[in-house]
Image (cartoon, helix red, strand yellow):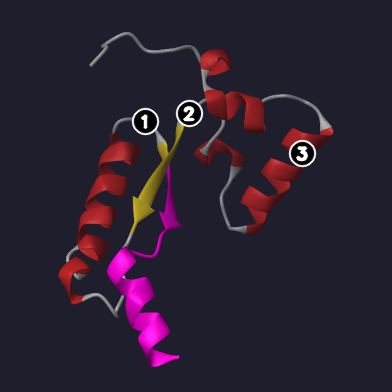
Amino acid sequence: MSSIRKKPEALRSHRWYGVNDLRSFGHRSRTAQMGYHASDYMGKPVIAVVNTWSEINSCHTHFKQRVEEVKRGIWQAGGSPRTNGRASRAASRVRRAIA
């Protein structure tokens, strides 16, 4: 793991939020609609946390707590976490069986 910090302009999230164009405006406005302030993401790496937690899959019940712990670590390290829900393979099979 590298200990060298990238400058905010070198971050991929800068292309989403830092550029002054229509596309970045769309990203900033949708992020504001979710309740985030510009200080929550400007100049910080935005990090996706993929989460397969669901009430259907009992094997992943601990993931909800783990994701919150990971997000707290990202905030503490100076990043900006975003959770992205993802259905596990088992959950998709259960949904087909129920339907």
Query: Which residue is located at x 77 percent, y 38 percent?
Result: 25
Depth check, front residue: 56 or 31: 56
How dense is the environment of label 3, judged by Cα within 10 Å: few (below 14), some, or many (20 and up)?
some
Q: Is residue 15 left or right of residue 5?
A: right
Depth check, front residue: 29 or 63: 63
Query: Picture coordinates of residue 99 (x, y %)?
Result: 45, 91
Query: Which residue is located at x 48 percent, y 28 percent?
Result: 44
> Quick check: can you spot residue 53?
no
Query: Which residue is located at x 30 percent, y 31 percent?
Result: 77
Residue holding disc 3: 25
Distance from label 3 to label 1 (Cα)?
23 Å
Chain-order first, disc 2 or disc 3: 3
Q: Is residue 80 above or below residue 65?
A: above
The amino acid on which the numbered mark 3 sits, given as a three-letter code, is Phe
Cβ–Cβ under 8 Å for marks 1 and 2: yes
Which mark, residue 44?
2
Q: Is residue 28 within the magenta segment?
A: no
Query: Which residue is located at x 38 percent, y 73 percent?
Result: 92
Q: Is residue 8 above or below residue 93?
A: above
Magenta residues (range): 81-99
Which mark, residue 78?
1
The amino acid on which the numbered mark 1 sits, given as a three-letter code, is Gly
Q: Is residue 83 above or below residue 56?
A: above
Chain-order first, disc 3 or disc 1: 3
The amino acid on which the numbered mark 2 sits, given as a three-letter code, is Lys
> Quick check: can you spot residue 45?
yes
Query: Picture coordinates of residue 65 (x, y %)?
Result: 21, 62
Instruction: State the SS at label 2.
Output: loop
Q: Is residue 39 left or right of residue 80?
A: right
Q: Is residue 93 within the magenta segment?
A: yes
